[in-house]
Amino acid sequence: MEGQTNKRLATLVGCNYVGTPYELRGCINDVDAVRDTLVARFGFAPADVAVLTDVRGAEVLPTGANIRRALADMVARAAPGDVLFFHYSGHGTLVPPQHGEGGAEKEAIVPSDFNLITDVDFRLLVDRVPPGASFTIVSDSCHSGGLIDQEKEQIGPSVCFDSGAPPTRTARFVPYVALLDHLSAISGMPSSIHIADHLVALFGADASAKFHAHGRSGNGSTLSTALAPASAPTQPRPDEGILLSGCQTNETSADVPSYEASGGKACGAFSSAVQSVLAAHPTPMSNRELVAKARAVLNEVGFEQHPCLYCTDANAEAPFLSQGKEEAAVGAALL
């Protein structure tokens, strides 16, 4: 239709893991705040913002399969010029290399059913984004730096700030050993084997593409086409993936039980810092500026975590969520 504007699509996920040993307090509050900001400031239609949380009574839980499906559906709807956004608040973890892989531990988020979504899964999603569209990921979780495999670091471990004693908080981190013990109790397999074997046995084709050899599950079934690595590149290439992570790969992100900056509500320190920066700056800010200012906010109040930015050089200087003059006017009117 003539004059039709580009779409703005979002998927927001918050996992509090209520009733488990890994319970958090602020993740669902983060999602509520982000949803309000997307609609009020950035021009997202409420119907185009999908929300998955593990709040009691939720019809669709943020399981690994459900999150993958929501993200794949969002990417499938995208056309050139569209703005895609994924916010995740919850636990993160590091996965050691499988036998024979070598290399360093890799990043993953922890859905409500512990069916990990890895850096490889996010790389496969980013590679499906149409040219000219953008896919911004904000991950307020531990070890979230580098969560898009092979994405270029713009702000990362080489940029540091001194910090004082951190406020009271809980790390949004599930240790690898704890994940193994939890999954082993369900799968019935010994915890001495790699987590990939547990996840493939429990979730089959819904397990991370990282844990499948040649795009096939351990039971012989073909991986879901949503994330199957049919033509994943072996070398980094310019793309439209933009990652704003709550911390560096070797750090934890804070879940704060009560924080003045969030009206006394439980929240994620990084999510709250981003909200504070956006509220103080109604005019468009680049992705680089937003991460740098969020770093400064966290440093000022003593959080020992350093948000990072991963994207192309052009996207580092592009406005966060492609905010234009119309959205900026709305943001200024809200102050």
Image (cartoon, rainbow, N blue to C red):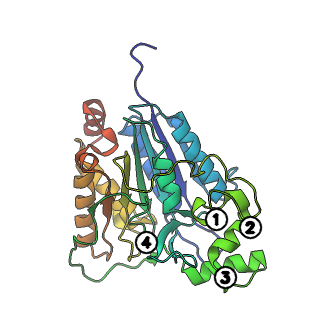
Give the CA distance from mark 2 to mark 3: 14 Å
Residue 260 falls in image quadrant: bottom left
Q: Earlier in the sequence, mark 3 or mark 4?
A: 4
Q: Which residue is mark 1?
A: 115
Q: Earlier in the sequence, mark 2 or mark 4?
A: 4
Residue 143 has which mark?
4
Q: How busy is the neighbourhood of tag 4: few (under 14 within 10 Å), some, or many (20 plus)?
A: many
Question: Is residue 63 shown to the viewer in this render?
Answer: no
Q: Which residue is mark 2?
A: 202
Element type where label 3 sits in the image: loop
Give the CA distance from mark 2 to mark 1: 9 Å
Q: CB of mark 3 within 8 Å of CB of mark 4?
A: no
Q: Nearer the viewer, residue 104 or 133?
A: 104
Q: CB of mark 2 within 8 Å of CB of mark 1?
A: yes
Give the CA distance from mark 3 to mark 4: 22 Å
Looking at numbered disc 2 in the image, what kind of residue is underneath it?
Leu
Q: Residue at x 40, y 79 (%)?
A: 168
Q: Earlier in the sequence, mark 2 or mark 3?
A: 3
Looking at numbered disc 1 in the image, what kind of residue is underneath it?
Asn
Q: Which residue is mark 3?
A: 193
